[in-house]
Each structure stands twice: as C-alpha cells, then as structure tokens.
Image (tube, rainbow, N blue to C red):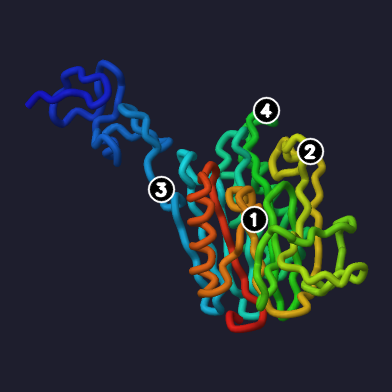
Amino acid sequence: MAVNCPVCEAPVLAGDSFCEACGQRLDAPACAGCGAPAVDADGYCERCGLRQPTGRDHAEIELAGGAAGVTDKGLRRARNEDAMALLSTGTATVAVVCDGVGSSPRADEASAVAVETAAAALARGASAVEAFELAGHAVTKLASSVEHAPACTYVSAVVTGGEITISWAGDTRAYWLPAGEPLTTDDTRRVVEPLTTDDTRPVGAPPAATGAEPTGEQLTEDDAAPTGEITAWLGADAGDVEPRVRTLAPAGPGLLLVCSDGLWRYLAGYAFPRSGTPLEMARAMLRHALDSGGQDNVTIVLIPLGGPHG
C-alpha cells in the first residue's frame, strides 16, 4: 500500500525505512504537536519544527529531610537549559544548580554534565573548589573547539549541621531567607564586603553598623559586567576561571534558596511564601516567575536549616 512521506509528502511504499525523495526516516518518533512521525535525532519535528517535550521540561525533587527543588523550562524557551542536583549523604545536603549559557551550543548538555559531576564529587567529600574544577573539566570535554564550546553558570551549596558552604561562577545565585519574619526583597540586605574565597561569617544577624533586621540576604555576587553580560562560566572558552567560595553559619533557622536567573529577575518587591513545605514554597515561587512572564528557564532549590522544616 502506498503512503506519503510525512515531510515532503512524496509517495513511499509501506515497509520502506527512508523516503527516497528527501531521505527522511519513515520510522521516526511521532511529533507531540502535529503527530507526524518526523522527529529527528535532536528532538525537533522535521514537519512542524516543534521541539519535543523532555523529562527536563519540568522536574521536581523532594528529600526526606524536607529539602526540595523545582526546575521548569518557562514560557518562552523551547527547552530547559537549567539543571539541578539535590541529594543527601546522611551528614550533608548537597545542591548544585547550573544555567546553560544560551549563546553557546548544547547548553543543556553543559548544565547537565556540570551538576552531575559536581554533585557526585561533593557527595563523596570533595572540596568546593575540587568539585568546581571537575565540573569545569567535564563541560570542557563537550567542546568540539573553543569556538563551539557548550557553557553554563554554576552554584553549589553544601549544608552540614548549621554550616553552609557556597561556591559559584556566573550569575546563578544563593539567598538566605530567615524564618519568623516577613520575607521580602524590598529591603533585602545585600552583602557589601568583598566576597572572596574563604569568606567566613555568620548570616541572619543584624549588621553591626545599623542594627537593622535583615529580611533576606543575597549570599552570592554576580560575575557580570555592568551591562549584564556574565564574566565567569564553565566551558572550554571560559579561560582561567576560579570559583568564589563562602562558608557561613546562620544565626537562626531559615531556608537556603539556590536559584537561576529565571527566578531572581522577578524578585524585586516579591514577598516570599512564609508557610508550607519547601516543595510547596518552591512551587509558589515558580508560579510567581511564570506569572511574571516566565521568559527564561526557572530553577529553585530550598534547603531548610533549623525550625519546623528541619
């Protein structure tokens, strides 16, 4: 029985593997949009052009201790180039969030391999710097050349007891959200002293100079130019980049928030949720990002320290 090629519509015979006119595979997966069996190896429909949904379009993680993460492709992106890892070693909670650099090729692969490599290293006890370097080497190996180099930003967090160690490069961020008070970014106290490796100090305590009560604190400082371009990332074209590392001891209970710019670009004036489990709060933050435009991929990880959540 004669049928037509789903792409060029040339006649083909039942049982043929390829269209002789255009070379299209005739046993390709069906498109989730138009239904044509024309999805190529890169996940795009050769007929309508739709990028096919993947398991990364939306994913959630919740650990037994309450820590939780949510990642979503947002409303404007064809795919999710963010990646996250969240795991417990029994003595520590490890989180890694990477945001693929959109101007680089295969940015989704860069973020995926970075979080997998770094999380595994941190879980086995590697230092923040060692995990960063291993992730950087893994991303560098993806490049076919310096001109075609997958790239991603990076932030990791290791929570052990009441101590947090954060490492980052780029504009993926971490925040401390203290419990028991309104959480809003209207008057967020930003870190004003230089953020350097081995910067150790308590967070969540009033600044000595003013006595003002913090309502939330950005723990990282963006590696970015005044015009917004990032100045540090992982990848073969990253140059001699080194992570910045901070070790902090919260003065009271709260939540560590690790997120990509798909969330933090919408935080001005936002009142963080004050109730619910970390997963419910992460979902609420995701809804806020989507309701605000959802122009980028969104990744949110919340790790509770002390208090009712942990």
The quarter of the rendered structure image containing the N terminus is top left
Q: Is tag 2's residue or tag 3's residue first in the polypeptide sequence?
A: 3
Mark number, residue 269: 1
Nearest to the eye among marks 1 and 4: give it.
1
User: For the residues marked 1 and 2, what is the alpha-carbon distance in whole angstroms?
Assistant: 24 Å
* Helix, strand or loop for disc 2: loop
Nearest to the eye among marks 1 and 2: give it.
1
The residue that label 2 is drawn on is 225
Q: Is tag 1's residue or tag 2's residue first in the polypeptide sequence?
A: 2
In the current view of this chain or complex, which residue is farthest to the right?
Answer: 209
- Residue 269: x and y, percent? 64, 55
Closer to the camera in the image, 269 or 171: 269
Crowdedness of circle 4 by 10 Å Cα count: few (<14), some, many (20+)? few
Closer to the camera in the image, 250 or 25: 250
Relative to 258, does residue 292 appear above or below in the rendering? Answer: above
User: For the residues marked 4 and 2, what is the alpha-carbon distance in whole angstroms?
Assistant: 21 Å
Q: Is tag 4's residue or tag 2's residue first in the polypeptide sequence?
A: 4
Q: What kind of residue is marked 1?
A: Gly
Please say if the residues under marks 3 and 4 sit with CB atoms less than 8 Å apart.
no
Mark number, residue 147: 4
- Residue 141: x and y, percent? 65, 42
Give the residue drawn at x 92%, y 68%: 209
The residue that label 3 is drawn on is 54
